[in-house]
Amino acid sequence: MQRLLAIAIVLAACGKKPAPPKADPGAARTVEPAAEAKAPTGDPCAKAHAEGGEVMPWIADDLPSALACAKQRKVPVVLDLWAPWCHTCLSMQSTVFTDASFQPDVARFVFASLDTDKEINADAVAKYPLSAWPTFYVIGEDKSTGQPDAVLARFVGAASVAQFHAFLDAGVKAQQGGAAGADAHLLGAERAITVKDLATAEQELTQALAKAPADWARRPDALTTLIHTKRKRGDIAGCLDVADKSLDDTGSAAAATDFLVSAMA
């Protein structure tokens, strides 16, 4: 009965448009007034600060400085597209990013947080669009094309510590040219979504899930992305089909909730 109810919820919700956000005064990170975008001056890496017990130091609302710091350090950038009213965003900050296991990643990445409510971040959000709050990207040089700020990995919604590690590792792997099989198709989907080519994204996601091994760490977030994509394309029957076939494949991690919540948003 619970499974049938969940599928019915997905079916009903897939036809809905995303609800407008509701303001929330609470935020784990300091929310500063918006400022005019400027070219980086001085040491861009000095702008990174850890707040609220987070392990990673974040460069806030300044993608140009984050990219300059990444170029200086020769590492990719992790983008957190969040909003202070987003409870999932705040939960990630207070319960996931505080995990000590991310300490080695401080040396592997530059971390940049962009409050999507701020006009200063509008250009960055247009270039790296959200499917829901939060949306995360790993961006950096694509060594096969030479593009300095290519999408290397993407993650939508809440993640467990293990899932976020898998997302970060996927970004490093893609930059090194090691994405193959299911990983390569997922990367293709993530890049297609960034340029709003939803038809290609759905094809790539379908191929990724078909080719993925049973223990593929990114299966839950690929399924979540697929249901986001089908919802945006207005494919109600497809939403129901994915829900019917894949509810059991999302496991008990955060993506299992996101799988349903993303359709209900």
Image (cartoon, rainbow, N blue to C red):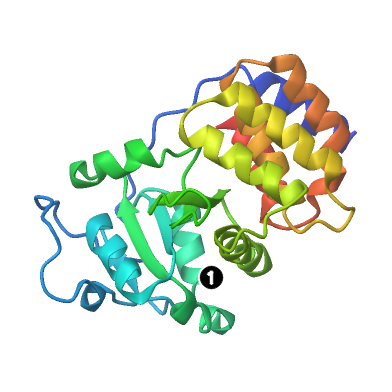
Residue 96 at x, y percent in the picture: 55, 69
Residue ID at (14%, 51%): 34
Q: Viewer-proximal residue, 240 or 232?
A: 232
Instruction: Give the percent coordinates (x, y) of residue 33.
Output: 14, 55
> Is residue 51 among the parts visible in the rendering?
no
Quarter of the picture holding the C terminus: top right
The image shows a total of numbered marks equal to 1
Quarter of the figure with residue 60 = bottom left
Q: What percent of the width, then of the height, locates residue 16?
A: 56, 19
In the image, residue 179 above or below residue 247: below
Q: Secondary structure at mark 1?
A: helix
Left or right: where does residue 43 sit relative to residue 104? left
Residue at image coords 87%, 45%: 248
Please provide percent x and percent y for residue 90: 44, 59
Q: Nearer the viewer, residue 9 or 109?
A: 109
Q: Is residue 256 above or below residue 11?
A: below
Give the quarter of the image for residue 199: top right
138 with respect to 61 (left or right): right
Kindly tell me whether residue 207 is visible in this rendering.
yes
Task: Name which residue lies at 72% across and 27% down.
Answer: 9
Q: Amino acid at mark 1?
A: Thr
Q: Which residue is mark 1?
A: 95
Badge 1: few (under 14), some or many (20 or more) residues near its Cα, within 10 Å?
A: few
Q: Residue at x 64, y 64 (%)?
A: 160
Foreground of the two, 168 or 156 = 168
Quadrant where the N terminus is found in the figure: top right
